[in-house]
C-alpha cells in the first residue's frame, strides 16, 4: 500500500477481495463472513437488489458465523496430533469399504468415499488454520487483527 502509516482494516481488505486468490474451507468462510458483514454495515455501497435481499443476507451471515464458531470450538478442542489421528481413522474407514475387491454395494462405497473425503479435507483445513493462527480466534478478534486479515485474504 502506498501509505505505510495507514491502518489496514476489514474494509481495506474487502476492497481487495476480488483479486485475492481462491481458497476453500475455513479461510473462504472467514472471507465470506467479513465481506458480507462489511457490505451489510456499509450503507453507501449497497445496491437496490442487495437491499431487497437484506433479510436473507443477514440470515446467511448469522449461519456462517455460527458455522465458524462451531469450527473454531472444534479446532481449539483438539490438538494437531488428534486431528491427524482422525484423518487416519477416516482413511482406514475409506480403505475398509472402498478397497478393490470389496463386496459392499457401489452406493455404499460412494457415500463412504464422499464422507471420508469431506472429513479428511476438513481436518486438513483445521490443521492448516492452526498452523497459521495457533488457536483459532473469535471473529471480533480476527476483525481487529491486521496480521490475521493478511492471512485470510492472502
Image (cartoon, helix red, strand yellow):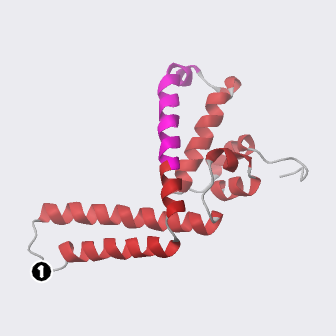
On the rendered image, what quadrant is the C terminus found in? Answer: bottom right
Q: Which residue is mark 1?
A: 101
Q: Residues within 10 Å of mark 1 (few under 14, many from 20)?
A: few
* x then y, percent, for residue 43: 68, 23
**Residue 62 in magenta?**
yes
Task: Please tell me which residue is depicted at 48% across the width and 30% down the height of the picture.
Answer: 59
Q: Quadrant of residue 93?
A: bottom left
The correct choice, above or below, for 12 with respect to 27 in the image is above
* x then y, percent, for residue 153: 65, 54
* x then y, percent, for residue 147: 74, 57
Task: Please tell me which residue is depicted at 72% across the width and 40% down the height of the picture.
Answer: 11
The correct choice, above or below, for 60 with respect to 79 in the image is above
Please provide the residue range marked out in magenta: 48-69
Secondary structure predominantly adopted by residues drawn in magenta: helix
Task: Please tell me which residue is depicted at 12% across the width and 80% down the height of the picture.
Answer: 101
Q: Which residue is more in the foreground, 58 or 78?
A: 78
Amino acid at each position: 500500500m502506498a501509505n505505510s502509516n495507514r491502518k489496514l482494516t476489514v474494509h481495506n481488505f474487502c476492497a481487495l477481495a476480488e483479486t485475492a486468490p481462491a481458497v476453500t474451507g475455513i479461510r473462504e468462510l472467514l472471507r465470506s463472513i467479513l465481506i458480507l458483514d462489511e457490505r451489510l454495515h456499509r450503507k453507501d455501497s449497497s445496491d437496490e437488489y442487495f437491499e431487497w435481499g437484506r433479510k436473507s443476507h443477514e440470515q446467511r451471515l448469522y449461519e456462517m458465523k455460527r458455522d465458524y464458531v462451531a469450527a473454531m470450538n472444534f479446532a481449539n478442542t483438539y490438538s494437531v496430533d488428534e486431528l491427524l489421528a482422525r484423518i487416519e481413522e477416516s482413511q482406514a474407514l475409506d480403505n475398509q469399504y472402498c478397497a478393490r475387491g470389496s463386496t459392499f454395494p457401489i452406493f455404499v462405497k460412494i457415500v463412504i468415499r464422499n464422507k471420508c473425503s469431506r472429513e479428511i479435507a476438513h481436518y486438513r483445513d483445521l490443521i492448516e488454520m492452526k498452523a497459521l493462527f495457533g488457536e483459532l480466534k473469535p471473529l471480533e478478534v480476527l476483525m481487529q487483527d491486521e496480521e490475521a486479515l493478511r492471512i485470510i485474504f492472502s
